[in-house]
Amino acid sequence: MRVLLSAYACEPNKGSEPEIGWQRALHMVAHADEVWVLTRANNQAIIEADPLSHAPGLHFIYYDLPRWLLRLKKQAWFLPVYFILWQWGAYRVAARRHRGKPFDYVYHVTFSGMQAGSFMGRLGIPFVIGPIAGGERAPLRLRRGMPFRGQASELLRDLGILLQRYSPLTCTALAAAERIYVVTPDSLRMVLPKWHHKTQVHLSVAIRSQTFPQTERRPPAALPRFVFAGRLLHWKGAHFAIRALAEARRTVPEATLTLVGSGPDERWLRALARRCGVADAVEFSGQLPRQQLLGSLPGYIALVFPSLHDSGGFVVLEALQNGVPVVCLDLGGPGVMVNESCGIVVPTAGADEAQVVDGIANAMISLALMPAAERQRLSAGAIARANELSWPRLTESIVGRGGSG
């Protein structure tokens, strides 16, 4: 069985989209005789420097556009054109390989969005797309506290979702697919109803490996310290976490919040912390190296991650893997990953900002006052949930349902 993965983004130890492409490539090897990964030539050096790239049966095909087009890529206006051209060029490379020695299946892995489409369905073999994302939207009631530019950005994003749904590039790719996977129920917005019969919801991110049993790990944190990790952007929900901390401190005055990350909305968030009277309880630690962040996670009671439209959320999985419960909203990928066994999911249906903030604050209070035995149970549940969301299980599920298995 020869399988082709179209993975524009595919690099080890990069996180986000490159991690998705890389892990899907590594774990597809268990389900096929040969796995060929078509990715950017720019990724070649870092891929081949990793010993895992030389696994038996795993092969890489590197392709990029001509240099003069790569120079134009630096211009923001040209990026959408560049991505479309890369997808078309990648298809032509795949078609030549396919004529020489046919593939049995082709998967579109990354990008997880379909803005640039995918032409791999033209190969005439079973074609599997996804999991794709991009249909997640911030509820209108939860946008009022955003800066004006954030609200405008969200409206433009809404328009982009609508246009993408009816884009010929998206529709052509989805029509050709044998099976379509979407990251969340909200991502079904990207798929017209006539293709829902071949569409399933499936997360696109997972943990790298099985975690240790809880008995081999340090006890969960006891101090009422909470952490947010992510870019400081209006839609990541850090402003909800700050407002919730101010409410929670009325009951748990020693509670603190650490914001790990940087971004254009840091000044706005600092001003919000001052207005809420919690500037001394909110630490802005800036961007941390990944291993340093992971090492610090067990020192917190919980990760508070109230993102409004995160399709994935690697940090949520990493927190669970470290036995750290998660407080999130019932939106996007985090709302699918987290359940009552490993954290607290705050409902948003029909809720306004004040109600969501109350929900997060109540979750923080509950976790801060939770008996040690109950906190231990929740920590063990976080690890158990992470083990359910591993790359081998994710890949097996996708291959078994819609591909080469």
Image (cartoon, helix red, strand yellow):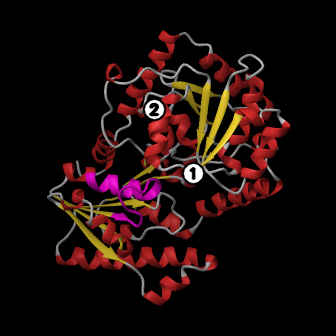
Residue lying at 21% horizontally and 53% vertically, measured from the top left: 29
Residue 73 included in the magenta stretch of the image: no
Residue 50, image quadrant: bottom left
Most extreme residue toward the bottom, as rendered? 68
Comparing 340 with 13, the one in front is 13
* Quadrant in the rendering for residue 210: top left
Disc on res. 153 = none
- Look at the picture and state if 17 lies above or below 59: above
Name the foreground residue: 148 vs 216: 216
Which residue is depicted at the point 34% across and 79% down? 92
How would you rate the neighbour count of disc 1 (Cα within 10 Å): few for under 14, some for 14-19, many for 20 or more?
Answer: some
Query: Could you tell me how far apart the alpha carbons at marks 2 and 1 are, in whole angstroms?
Result: 20 Å
Amino acid under label 2? Leu
Secondary structure of the residue carrying numbered label 2: helix
Q: Which residue is mark 2?
A: 320
Which residue is found at the position 23% from the left and 56% from the top? 52
Tell me where the magenta segment starts and ends, as one range.
6-26
Instruction: Identify the disc placed on residue 287.
Output: 1
The spot of residue 217 in percent (x, y) is: 36, 24
Q: Is residue 244 left or right of residue 218?
A: right
**Residue 332 percent coordinates (x, y):** 57, 42
| Amino acid residing under circle 1 | Gln
Residue 275 falls in image quadrant: top right
Element on which disc 1 rests: loop
Residue found 57% across the figure and 75% down from its top:
79
Query: As displayed, is residue 28 above or below residue 308?
Result: below
405 sits left or right of 243 in the view: left
Q: Position of residue 177 (x, y in %)?
A: 39, 59
Mark earlier in primary sequence (2, 1): 1
Q: 365 or 129, which lies in front?
A: 365
